[in-house]
Amino acid sequence: MASVIVGKYKGRKFYTCKDTKIRPTQGRVKKSAMQIIGPFEGSNVLDLFSGIGTLGIEALSRGASSATFVEMHYSSMKYLKKNINHICPNDKINIVQEDVFSFLKSCNNKFDIILADPPYKKVDMSKLHDLVKNILSENGKYFIEMKRFQIEESKDIRIKYYGNTQVVFGWKKN
């Protein structure tokens, strides 16, 4: 069973969905990616393709000041809300039930840290990568988990591999 790894909510268990289409971020990937992208203290975090909320809730546990969760699917949304109420009901949270690409195109806010774990087969990763950079605050950071070899490393991104998974890390410098 998935649980919060570090911080004020360490050890709290997530309610998980039996729907096989929902694939929470693997524990070792989450742990490593969060260490690389942190620190989180005082950050405004965006969790895209939130699923059951493991990434955004982990960020809140590590000191993020707020988190916005964007998830479109009803079954995921049900568990996302249940996990927030169970683990971090008093944190500053915004939940958006909308298609991620629609949200990114219309979003007027900037975020310090953006976390994304989209369904591997159904998402144009290059398009997602470009849209994420548009709403990143100055000196902001992001990671996108994807199937291996979907985006190549460049000067503004770094890639870490975990089996058949690659995590793309990027940042926006002023």
Image: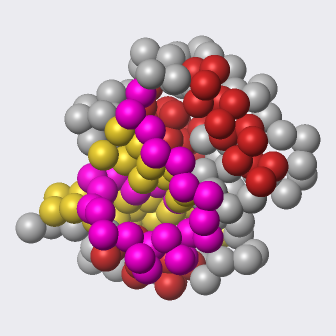
Say above or below: 145 vs 129.
Answer: above
- Residue 114 is one of the magenta-drawn residues: yes
- Residue 109 is one of the magenta-drawn residues: yes
Identify the residue at horizontal 53%, vertical 77% (top origin).
Answer: 102
**Image position of 22 (left or right of 105):** right
Identify the residue at horizontal 27%, vertical 62% (top origin).
Answer: 110
Q: Which quarter of the figure has residue 26? A: top right
Say above or below: 60 vs 104.
Answer: above
Highlighted magenta segment, given as a residue range: 91-117
Identify the residue at horizontal 17%, vertical 58% (top origin).
Answer: 139
**Image position of 46 (left or right of 80):** left
Q: Quadrant of the N terminus?
A: top right
Regarding residue 134, the answer to whether it shows in the image is yes
Q: Position of residue 126 (x, y in %)?
A: 51, 83
- List the single residue furthest toward the left: 174
Identify the residue at horizontal 44%, vertical 22% (top origin).
Answer: 90
**Looking at this view, is 14 or 39 the one in front?**
14
**Looking at this view, is 18 or 33 the one in front?**
18
Say above or below: 136 vs 46.
Answer: below
Q: Quadrant of the C terminus?
A: bottom left
Q: Which quarter of the figure has residue 137? A: bottom left
Q: Position of residue 61 (x, y in %)?
A: 44, 25
Q: Position of residue 111 (x, y in %)?
A: 30, 56
Say above or below: 65 vs 88.
Answer: below
Identify the image's colour scheme: rainbow, by chain, secondary structure or one colour: secondary structure
**Image position of 121 (left or right of 98):** right
